[in-house]
Image (spheres, rainbow, N blue to C red):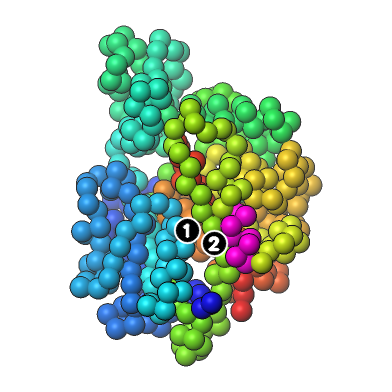
Amino acid sequence: MTKVCVIGIGFTNFNPITPDMEWKDIMYEACQKAYVDAGVDPRRDIDSFITCAEDYWEGFSIFDEFVPDQVGALLRPCCTVCGDGIYGLGNAAMQIQTGLMDVVSIEAHSKVSDLLTYGDVVLHAMDPIYDRPVSGPVERPNYAGLPSYPEENPKPLVGSSDETDRVHPYFLAGLEMQHFLKTTGTTEEECAEVAVKNKKNAFLNPYAAYEAKISADHVMKSEYCFKPLKRMDISPNVDGAVCFVLANENIAKDLGIEPIYLEGFGWSSETPWLSTRGMEAEYARKSAEMAYKMADIVQPTKEIDLAEIDDRFTYKELQHLEALGLARKGEAKTLLKEGVTEIEGDLPINPSGGSLGVGNCLEATGLQKSLEIIMQLRGHAGKRQVPDAEVGLAQAWRGLPSGSGAVAIFRRG
């Protein structure tokens, strides 16, 4: 089968707010940088263009009508994947493997600072009968500062009385974190160490927005939002864009580019309805199994040199580490404690700083994770460089309330 390579990457800086740029601007910047990096002309050399976006995040419908101008796809084949950026990589790889396309561009972005109703959008994704109307006479903590919490005095949910207050949708993460702690014997303090590690790694990443020198005590003393989830257990939202250019192996050789191979990818799109799925990260396990099989990975812990995995909540890094088969059930906390997941450890996890250090960039999360892997495999990661990195794994989850995720495995040529 045709081998698929990464021949170009481009990205913007990641910032909590970008009032001087529109989403069109950040898309254009990331794509132009990727095309220059790959040495290709989008009007001449790229056969297909993919953007990963969701109309709700953009604030208007049929977003893909506005895509071609920014990515260089005017009057060219262009499609939208309503999912994480790794889904876009998978779609691009399959297009190339058909033999119909030789070079494909994939773009994903976040302009979440323009979204005034992040919480409402998340709520709208929930079951309209059983989950969405969650409300009641609760003692609500101060949510100011949480990622794009809805208006200060939110309107009651449909079906609730005017005297009740809406519950922020991140309460689901609190419930899932309780389940994870109970079933694995992990403590809140051990989850706090994830934030410490990732924000420390972000100091070494020039494009990270949320680097900080903190201790586990700082995390533990931050306000409980959805017990046991605290404010500093939550990754803040961020604006940014990433673009990848994939090509078949022969094109890479013709361009004189040392290829990074997309060896395997997998995905799992489960139901978002909480009543029909559990609180385990099955999407990560299933997508990893698919990717490992494609990449001929038999022993992930021995064959993978580093991983960028979804950490939009601190416990998620540990949960995903186990679901991906990089740790046994309940072992992730031990690997963290022993320094195995540090940049200088045997299995570095999120050397970029992860979403806790870079920020939650919505559908661009998977491409941000993949971006770090490519930089590491190219040897371009600077002070956070993992020595002798040959094989890297990127994994992303689509966020609440979904049970969907994807995995990509890259190998240096």
Query: In the rendered view, would you say 384 is above or below 54?
Result: below
Identify which amino acid the numbered label 1 is placed on.
Ile
CA gap between label 1 and label 2 equals: 8 Å
Residue 234 in the figure: left or right of residue 44 = right
**On the image, numbered disc 1 is attached to which residue?**
86
Examine the residues drawn in magenta and state their main secondary structure. Answer: helix
Q: Nearer the viewer, residue 285 or 180?
A: 285
**Is residue 289 in the magenta section?**
yes
Expressed as whole percent of the image width and height from the top left, the position of residue 212 reads: 57, 46
At 34% across and 12% down in the image, what residue appears? 164
Identify which amino acid the numbered label 2 is placed on.
Phe
At 51% across and 82% down in the image, what residue appears? 249
Q: Which of the 4 quarters of the picture holds residue 182?
A: top right
Residue 121 visible, this orientation: yes
Q: Secondary structure at mark 1?
A: helix
Query: In the rendered view, would you say 268 is above or below 191?
Result: below
First-in-chain label (1 vs 2): 1
Q: Nearer the viewer, residue 98 or 175?
A: 98
Expressed as whole percent of the image width and height from the top left, the position of residue 71 reads: 29, 68
Residue 318 in the figure: left or right of residue 272 = right
The label nearer to you, 1 versus 2, is 2
Residue 187 in the figure: left or right of residue 283 = right
Task: Bin the neighbour count of mark 1 within 10 Å (Cα to Cα): few under 14, some 14-19, many 20 and up.
Answer: many
Expressed as whole percent of the image width and height from the top left, the position of residue 24 reads: 26, 60
- Dot label at residue 265: 2
Q: Secondary structure at mark 2?
A: strand
Q: Which of the 4 quarters of the picture holds residue 214?
A: top right
Q: Which residues are magenta?
A: 288-295
Contact check, label 1 and label 2, Cβ < 8 Å: yes
Quadrant in which the C terminus is drawn: bottom right
